[in-house]
Image: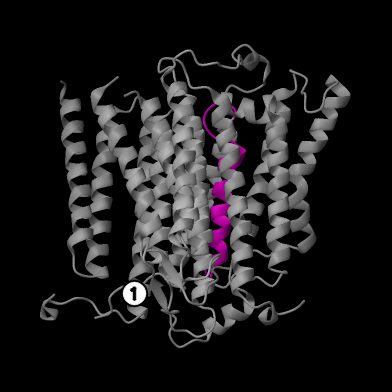
């Protein structure tokens, strides 16, 4: 296994870990805002690591460019979606969770 | 279990889930969702059977049929949803002209 | 067969079935629709595993994306119907979501057990019969395969799916486009031209810049998918789905949407079918049979038909979306409403 493969492997596993963490956050966090936070943060970083790991294995620069384009587009879309969901929740009168609420 | 058998059986199960939803769900929107699901089950059977020999490229004819089917399914869904809307909204409140 | 991939297949198919069941049993209809979108995305993973990348592209864009948007749109119109309070919802014994104000096919005191038994028997026997047909087909390896490999050389394209769609079985595709026209006609006559998309999403700098950034990319990717469809997965339907999604995005946001003259819209709508028919008739004159292309011209003709089809189908998809949108009256009533947050998006979130 070359260094390239090793770095790629570590990056892919780390990326999968971030996805796992984000999903757990979405399932376990108390309200819509914290869930969004967990999901978008973890997914953007997790996808970045996956893209990086896959780019090391790609056979052409065109494939690398496409992978990073996918990453950029997903970040754009997930950021906007997160903003819209949070905005709709805020306008619907959902107040952010705080420790005092006791859960 | 080969992938073909796995996905084809899943297609059969999805078809039966969709069919049961069509029979047993009361809400019309959920019936439309169920029909879509049953359709997806049929598509899955088609595409799984297109790939019976793993070492040769899959048969393009069922894939093209499914591609056609997806587009027809969305237009049928749109017609069903428009009918649903017509049912839930009194025609009188639609502005004329 | 790689055993880790077999595990992946098993998990994916199990998830598909579980999500499908959740769609039926989710208590809230909004939740059911979102689960349906998830189902579509998982299904496009399954298409990739089965080597059907063309289908995966179409499924992700049309099956999951656009169908989900149509359902959410319809749900929004029904929830905003009448008073602003969410309609009384009850859960019947089977866990089905029943809304007092919405019509159901059966009277609510649900069907007697004999009826349920009969329905269950029908569903069960159909499933058993289907399994009995499918399993022997799936395990036999001597698949009857239509010999198209040598025909591919004369088809004008190198992507076999595009060759089937636009050359060998062009009849199917022609009639499919006709079905799309019929659907648009039906939807727009049902909504009697009164449907007008209200700007459903709140405007803001984030969304506006997103739309400005993403639309050129959408158009570029659509052109790329169309162009590459002759030799790699892609083609008219996938490109049209992308363009249609871009159009829907323009419609629901507060961005300046380009207006389109009525007659121009109609011309573009039927252009795909018309050009396809003309090419077919030309084939009849040139090669003797309807929809038969002269081999030297096949590539050019297919590209021409696909390009026009892309525009037409994209417009069809946008018009289907418009047809299921709230009417103008409802839209304006909602715009002046005090609580714009009464969207289905968060109506079920806890508010404490």
Q: Residue furthest right?
A: C285
Q: Position of residue A25 (x, y in %)?
A: 19, 58
Q: Is residue B44 magenta?
A: no
Which quadrant holds residue C295?
A: top right
Q: Position of residue C21 (x, y in %)?
A: 36, 51
Q: Is residue C243 magenta?
A: yes
Q: Position of residue C128 (x, y in %)?
A: 44, 35
Horizontally, residue C294 falls left or right of residue C14, namely right
**Up/down of C77 relative to C16, above or below:** below
Horizontally, residue B96 falls left or right of residue A64, namely right
Task: Give the extent of the magenta segment.
Answer: C230-254
**Up/down of C146 relative to B78, above or below:** above
Horizontally, residue C274 falls left or right of residue C314, namely right
At horizontal 64% and vertical 57% (from top left) the residue drawn is: B79
- Main SS, magenta residues: helix
Quadrant location of the C terminus of chain C in the rendered image? bottom left
């Amino acid at each position: 296994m070359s260094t390239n493969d090793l770095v790629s492997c570590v990056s892919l596993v780390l990326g999968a870990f971030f996805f796992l963490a984000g999903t757990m956050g979405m399932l376990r966090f108390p309200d819509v805002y914290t869930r969004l936070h967990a999901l978008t943060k973890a997914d953007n970083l997790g996808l970045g690591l996956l893209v990086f790991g896959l780019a090391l294995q790609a056979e052409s620069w065109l494939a690398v460019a496409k992978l990073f384009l996918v990453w950029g587009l997903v970040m754009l879309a997930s950021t906007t979606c997160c903003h819209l969901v949070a905005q709709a929740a805020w306008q619907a009168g959902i107040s952010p969770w705080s420790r005092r609420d006791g859960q | 279990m080969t992938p073909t058998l796995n996905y084809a059986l899943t297609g059969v199960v999805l078809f039966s889930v969709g069919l049961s939803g069509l029979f047993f769900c009361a809400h019309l929107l959920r019936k439309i969702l169920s029909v879509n699901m049953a359709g997806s089950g049929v598509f899955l059977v088609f595409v799984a059977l297109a790939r019976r020999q793993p070492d040769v490229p899959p048969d393009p004819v069922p894939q093209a049929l499914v591609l056609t089917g997806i587009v027809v399914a969305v237009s049928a869904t749109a017609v069903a949803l428009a009918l649903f809307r017509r049912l839930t909204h009194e025609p009188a409140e639609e502005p004329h002209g | 067969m790689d055993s880790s991939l077999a595990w992946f297949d098993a998990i994916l198919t199990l998830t598909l079935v579980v999500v499908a069941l959740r769609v039926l049993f989710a208590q809230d209809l909004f939740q059911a629709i979102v689960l349906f979108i998830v189902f579509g995305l998982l299904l496009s993973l399954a298409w990739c595993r089965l080597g059907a990348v063309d289908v995966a592209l179409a499924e992700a864009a049309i099956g999951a994306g656009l169908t989900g948007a149509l359902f959410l749109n319809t749900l929004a119109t029904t929830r905003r119907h009448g008073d602003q309070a969410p309609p009384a919802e009850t859960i019947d014994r089977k866990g089905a979501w029943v809304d007092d104000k919405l019509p159901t096919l059966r009277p609510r005191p649900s069907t007697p057990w004999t009826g349920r038994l009969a329905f269950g028997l029908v569903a069960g026997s159909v499933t058993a019969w289907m399994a009995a047909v499918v399993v022997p087909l799936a395990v036999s390896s001597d698949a009857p395969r239509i010999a198209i490999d040598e025909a591919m050389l004369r088809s004008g394209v190198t992507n076999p799916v595009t060759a089937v769609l636009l050359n060998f079985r062009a009849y199917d595709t022609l009639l499919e486009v006709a079905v799309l026209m019929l659907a648009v006609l039906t939807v727009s006559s049902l909504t009697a031209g009164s449907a007008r998309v209200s700007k459903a999403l709140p405007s803001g700098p984030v969304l506006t810049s997103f739309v400005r950034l993403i639309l050129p990319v959408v158009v570029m990717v659509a052109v790329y998918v169309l162009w590459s469809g002759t030799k790699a997965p892609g083609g008219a339907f996938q490109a049209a789905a992308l363009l249609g999604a871009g159009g829907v995005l323009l419609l629901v946001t507060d961005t300046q949407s380009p207006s389109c003259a009525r007659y121009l819209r109609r011309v573009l709508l039927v252009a795909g079918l018309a050009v396809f028919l003309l090419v077919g008739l030309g084939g009849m004159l040139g090669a003797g049979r309807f929809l038969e292309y002269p081999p030297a011209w096949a590539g050019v003709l297919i590209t021409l038909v696909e390009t026009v089809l892309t525009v037409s189908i994209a417009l069809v998809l946008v018009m289907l979306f418009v047809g299921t949108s709230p009417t103008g009256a409802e839209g304006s009533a909602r715009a002046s409403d005090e609580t714009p947050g009464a969207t289905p998006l968060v109506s079920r979130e806890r508010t404490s």
